[in-house]
Amino acid sequence: MDGQQTHNGDGATMPGGLGGESAQPGARDSRMVEKAVRQRWPITPEKRAVIAEALIAIAGNKRSSVRNRTVAARVLVQMDAQNMEQEKRDRGIPDRLHLTIDDITGLSDDELVRRYQEKVRALGLG
């Protein structure tokens, strides 16, 4: 099996599997990557880029099974969601907007909207 190549959707070749020796990436490869992403295993940016490239190739390869293409697409979405979450943390953006009952009691709808918009702007979100 040494030296086998698989072709991505653009006709380019890449090593078999997800960097392994198999000619076709299998469900086991995809599940392992999915687990690594979901559990946030430490992955260097370089390896993360290689994994993303391999997943893009699998998702776009019409010769890959529907199952493998679906898993690859799902993992890519998970990776993107984690990137967005990390970007929010890096910018100091909280997961929730905290409003107390004192913030909203007795206010008109227009005033509620105005206060909400002030909080959003204060967080750098709008």
Image: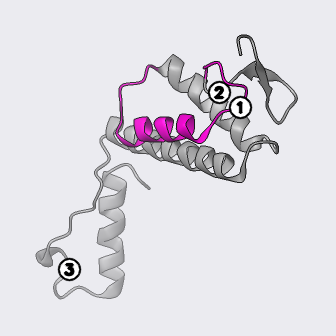
Residue under the point 32% across and 40% down: 89
The image shows residue 40 at horizontal and vertical percentages of 36, 36
Residue, disc 1: 24
Q: Under tag 1, what secondary structure?
A: loop
What is the magenta range? 19-44
Is 67 on the left-hand or right-hand side of 88?
right
Q: Tell me how many marks there are.
A: 3
Q: Is residue 54 left or right of residue 123?
A: right
Q: CA distance from mark 1 to mark 3?
A: 58 Å
Instruction: Name the residue located 36 percent from the left edge and 25 percent from the top edge.
Output: 42
- Check if mark 2's residue and mark 1's residue have beta carbons within 8 Å: yes
Residue under circle 2?
17
> Nearer the observer, disc 1 or disc 3?
1
Amino acid of disc 2: Gly
In this rendered view, identify the residue nearer to me: 24 or 121. Answer: 24
Residue found at the far left of this picture = 102
> How many residues crowd mark 3 within 10 Å: few (<14), some (14–19), many (20+)?
some
Spatial separation of the CA atoms under disc 2 and disc 1: 5 Å
Amino acid carrying mark 1 in the image? Gln
Query: Considering only order in the chain, which callout, 3 or 1, is on the residue closer to the N terminus?
Result: 1
- The residue positioned 74% from the left and 21% from the top of the image is 14
